[in-house]
Amino acid sequence: MKKYVQTMQYWEEITTNTNNYIIVITGLGGQGLIRFLRILGSSLVKKGYKVITSEKHGLSQRGGNVTCFLRFGEKMVAPIPIIGSADMIIATEKACILDVLEYAKLDRSSKLIVATYEKKSQINDYPSEEYLLKVLNEISDYINFIPVMEIVAKFTNLKIINTIILGYILRFLPISEEFINESINQHFAGDLLVLNQKAFEEGRDLK
Amino acid sequence: MRMEYLKILKGKSGGELFLLGNAAIARGALESGINVYTYYPGTPSSEVGEIFTILFKEAGLNWVESSVNEKIAIEVAGAAYARGAKAMVGMKNVGLNVASDAFFALATTHPKNKNSAIVVLVADDPQQYSSAVEMDSRYYLKLLKIPALEPSNPQECLDYTKSAFEISRELKIPVILRLVTMVAHARSNVKLGEIIQPEIDESFDLSPEVNVASRLYFLDLKQDQIYNRMNRALIISENSSLNRVEFENESNNFNLGIITSGVSYSYVIEALEFFNIKAPILKLGFINPLPERRIVAFLKQFKKVFVVEENDAYIETEVLAIAQKNCVQTKILGKDPFSYSKESSLLNFVGELNPTEIALALMKITNLTPKINLNQIKDKRYETVRRRPVLCPGCPYGTIGYALKKAVKKLKSDLGKEIYFYQDIGCYTLLSFPPYSFANVKYCMGSSIALAQGVAHTDDSLNIAIIGDGTFFHSGIPALLNGIHNKAPILVLILDNGWIGMTGQQHHPGSDPRYYQEGSFKKQIDLGKFLQGTGANISIIKHQKRIEGKYSDRLSDLIYEKGHSVLEKRDIHVIVIEDECTQKYIQRNTLEVRYIDGGQCTNCGICYTQFYCPALNEKDDRAQINSNECLGCGICEEICPNNAILGGDNNEY
Ligand SMILES: Cc1ncc(C[n+]2csc(CCOP(=O)(O)OP(=O)(O)O)c2C)c(N)n1
Ligand code: SF4
Ligand code: SF4
């Protein structure tokens, strides 16, 4: 499992050569993925990128799987990317990552960001740790498990998983912290704002 | 959301906002000087209505309402249009079916007022992410004979809304703005224009000869609609920049051109880039009437033209006819709509389209080998977790399902008869799944009560209709009157949770006006009194703790007793179950999270197998409450036979 930080030069290449960076985000209805898209998307817009986000949801507002896309670059593109093209795939619930692996690049270069939160279904079909690791290792060289549950326990709030991840992926994105902070300030108020600011910092400071 | 929505009004002309397609539509309407917005909520169209509800007074509109159903929404807005307003109506795909009767008359009328314009927003939902059926509303355009525009991204949502208002105002004909989920719920950079203050002409003309659909005037109006107004719409379509050829000077080795519209356009670009091939694309923003002349000119340049669209082959069928009429030899590729054959169809009629499906189709057309093996990726299968949508923690329907199940078990053994369930559309539809499984027949909003009648009149089984309060007001009332009048031996359960839960807790006529923003302007309809007025046998039960024993037992006993009496008296009985949607309830109340007393829990499993709450599970051989998810409704505490669920000492709910 390699970890690396992107340089600004990398970003210039990405946005001039391919015109487009593709993030797939998956998780469960009710986890606040739409807000995640809004915060990250508006930060990138402020930086001058063309951004498009979209969501496949519906009944999944309660407990079903949700898949979202966020794409940014120099020009406006389709709300859904082609399979095998995602630069980054984020799962805010662990096993959800298995739902969207078709978007991973065949050259194993997609970054997988997986929260360690587990939500079992009513039937006993949660995949084993070994199976998950085996599959993910086949797919990518860049697997990042985010130990969100430790942070969740600290703040006793399950709704901050997205914000922790937002803090974590900051290292890979071509924007500085201020842009995201500003968006977080616009999307939360009061106690929730303080909580999410802290969660963001926890994610940012993860190794 | 209020702050977020205010931005739509406050955003400066020339500025840029990161907007949802639906929000861009609201802005486009404000930039057109909209006077009236009426709607009925339905995903993926609801946000537009929510935005106007918030902006109503501040934006200076004359009227905004969430109507009782789509037919009423279009009638309210339609008459405002006749009177000289710029009106807009919003609904989801199936809402158009409900509105269609009134729409036919509206489409033909020809008001004289200068300002009059009406735009009807219809949001389709390919893949039925949040609909009971997948339905392509574009064939309505042929039935209604009205112009329609289809945007492909949030910026076009704004621009096309303005064009739609302009066209309607000029031609005095309703214009449909057709959306799909991937556009309504996409969010991207949107450049803003100037907002126009709404104005209505002080003097207006409601002449019968242009506004009355009757034999006296209708046929003349219809002549005018087709040969005058639609003819002029065609001229606009032929000359409009909304229909345009992109990449006009590009060419490829396959002599291939592409015709597409809406979000499919962006998918086509994606798929072409994937193969690194270039092709001219005729992008149709005007989806009715289609620009025949420009389609012919486009077709003639190519040996093959691929028509790319989602769901029905609406454009393709038209293009085939246009080619035949104009003796164009170009091969037209697409879904081969007359064959009903999956093999000869390059794209599926069913489900949502995406760039990958178009790339696979291009592979067949061009015989190119893609740089990555798409089929290999698609064929890979993983062990995924199958999750069903679930009720919220603390949802009143969990208790109702539990009580109903108990009552039904007893009734079955007493009566020795079958019991059937008729479901309706709302959160309670989830009671169709285990552990409850209450569904035998289900159609569309408002149908449960009549469905139950159909079986009850032909069988001696017990037939139970389950309908939410929102749906009851929307379209359940006529079916109930039919049942009362015909003495249908059915049991009707009206689940009165006070709100339209499913689409985001909007209000309906029975909602408590203290708890929604525009409530102070509204009158609440008392469901109980309303039902009493019908003369039907009714019972009303409220969720109140600590009176006359357990609520779930009282509910179960009531259902049991009335189930008996329906079959004995061979007459209808209505039970209203009042228990508020938890999502609304917790906005005003703090509840206490429950926990399991490990010493008391015998792991009987009643709370997590016979009752359903997403916060309750089995773990380490006993029941477990996930404290992050429990909302503290307390109903599990009541259901537990061992008093093992604790934590709600001060709870009044
Ligand atoms: C004709 C039509 N319009 C709108 C919708 C969208 N929709 C789905 S369920 C629902 C209302 C549900 O309200 P209610 O019956 O009170 O049930 P609840 O969700 O509160 O349980 C609506 C408006 C629809 N399915 N069909
Ligand atoms: S929104 Fe309300 S009615 Fe719907 S599942 Fe949640 S609590 Fe129940
Ligand atoms: S109190 Fe019980 S039924 Fe209510 S939300 Fe909590 S765990 Fe679920």
Image: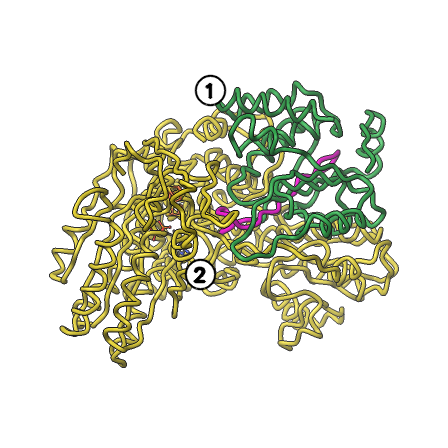
Q: Position of residue B252 (x, y in %)?
A: 86, 56
Instruction: Mark 2: give few (<14), some (14-19) or many (20+) Cα within 10 Å.
Output: few
- Determine the secondary structure under disc 2: loop
The stretch drawn in magenta includes residue B569: no
The stretch drawn in magenta includes residue A74: yes
- Which portion, as a residue range, is magenta? A57-76
**Residue highlighted by disc 1:** A190
Viewer-closest of B575 and B104: B575
User: Which chain is indicated by disc 2?
Assistant: B
Viewer-closest of B401 and B128: B401
Q: Position of residue B363 (x, y in %)?
A: 81, 62
Q: Position of residue B366 (x, y in %)?
A: 83, 64
Chain that is green in the image: A
| Whether residue B114 is visible | no
From the viewer's perspective, tell me whether residue A114 is left or right of residue B434: right
Instruction: Mark 1: give few (<14), some (14-19) or many (20+) Cα within 10 Å.
Output: few
Q: Nearer the viewer, mark 1 or mark 2?
A: 2
**Is B12 above or below relative to A111?**
above
Which corner quadrant holds the C terminus of chain B?
A: top left
Q: Position of residue B645 (x, y in %)?
A: 36, 42
The amino acid on which the numbered mark 1 sits, given as a three-letter code, is Gly
